[in-house]
Amino acid sequence: MSSTFQRKPSGVHHLRMMGIVITVYLLCFLQLTGVLDDCFCDIESIDVFNNFKIYPHIRKLVERDFFRYYKVNLKRPCPFWPDEGQCSIKDCHVEPCPEVRVQHFSQAAGSISDARECEQAHELGAVNSTLSNQTKEAFADWAHHDDAQDHFCGLDDEMSPEAEHVDLLLNPERYTGYKGPSAWRVWNSIYEENCFKPRSVYRPLNPLAPSRGEGFYKWMEGLCLEKRVFYRLISGLHSSINIHLCAEYLLDEGWGKSVWGPNLHEFRQRFDPAETKGEGTRRLKNLYFLYLIELRALSKVTPYFERSFINLYTGNSQEDSSTKELLLQVLNETKAFPMHFDESSMFAGHKIESKTLKEEFRLHFKNISRIMDCVGCSKCRLWGTLQTQGLGTALRILFSEKEIKKLPENSPSKGFQLTRQEIVALLNGFARSELLHQDEPLRRQIITRMFTVLYKTDSSGA
């Protein structure tokens, strides 16, 4: 029997499996229809608006120099528990796996793959901090310009001596090998301790819960709007991160070249209605809700950027002007969306109670930002920090409408201000809307990439 003839069943098998996983993936998204909870917007309208009005411009915007460099401190210690990341990695490209741990893996029968995963997590999780001398000199100029501005707000971690600029285009959000108890602990802490949930109420699919969490959504219905919004935003943020990791997964490292693409097994585990007992559909809807909140924030902050003295400074006046023009184009498009979330219904009750709830809301979110310092992988921490800060900036905008309206047209003020770091995080966080994009959607990309991988796999064996 010829070798070519022997390989054909493999190709047939791949095609059959491909059809199954594509069907599963599409079913997950096809179930997303109708009106979102706590607002009057439907998913179909968001899709159309994002695909044709927003995403083509936002994609170009975040490639500009002002938005591609994010200053962040990835070396802050976890303030809540000892670092227990996979292989004890705190900063993947600095701390190698302990020799004792490696020896343990190499000696244990059947555990060699664990040691390889450990090494892989270091390599894939490392942040590429390569910057040219010219770029570093430009950053010093940017800092001088920013320091001269009328911020009147705490720059917090941006001013830390350990903070460094990271090129987001060189460090895309994707799978790094970071998983296990440490990763689970981060998100469990966020949900269990920071989402206004009593310990007597169990989340669906929580492996530590004595029940399947049947009463969770009944409990949520009894919450005030503000607390429901908070939970859904965190769930949407979690979904966004998970989908990116599923879409950019390390499929193969053959011949010294990494092949990245969608991992449908990982996607099914998190979002397939059958695998998640319907929870996956709720998670994907919360992703849309997150988009809606950030869309509203961008529409509200437009007057801040419309002022002539607000510059997106990089030292290249021509590009700076072009970048601001593109940003204003995006912001003005957001104002045209007809079904924005109505944030005026939040914190609208008794003045003292509303103020207390708003402060509690803020502190819970700030705590989640600190939990991101417990992520044991540099690249995961980078994108987790950026998206958390982006959402935090969006919320600050929504709750600062009066201050934004009072801003003077032609001069700085002691009122509402945004730092460079906040602006970069806000727009890059919103740019994660590529997940909803249909012109080049993750939905179509997954199908295309899977057939590409299938073709390469089949061709290599032919």
Image (spheres, rainbow, N blue to C red):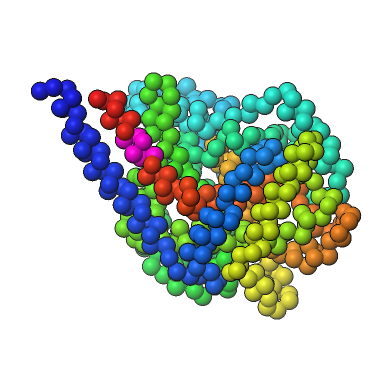
Q: Position of residue 417 (x, y in %)?
A: 79, 54
Q: Is residue 361 left or right of residue 243?
A: right
Q: Is residue 125 left or right of residue 323?
A: left
Seen from the viewer's position, the closer of residues 207 and 12 is: 12
Is 54 covered by the magenta stretch?
A: no
Task: Check the image and report above or below for 38 versus 128.
Answer: below
- Is residue 194 visible to the viewer in this orientation of the structure? yes
User: Residue at the location (47% across, 61% down)?
Assistant: 285
User: Residue at the location (70% across, 62% down)?
Assistant: 300
Q: Which residues are magenta?
A: 449-454
Task: Check the image and report above or below for 49 versus 435.
Answer: below
| Count of numbered circles on the image | 0
Q: Locate residue 223: give its quadrant.
A: bottom right
- Is residue 142 visible to the viewer in this orientation of the structure? no
Q: Quadrant of the N terminus?
A: top left
User: Residue at the location (55% across, 71% down)?
Assistant: 39
Is 450 covered by the magenta stretch?
A: yes
Seen from the viewer's position, the closer of residues 335 and 70 is: 335
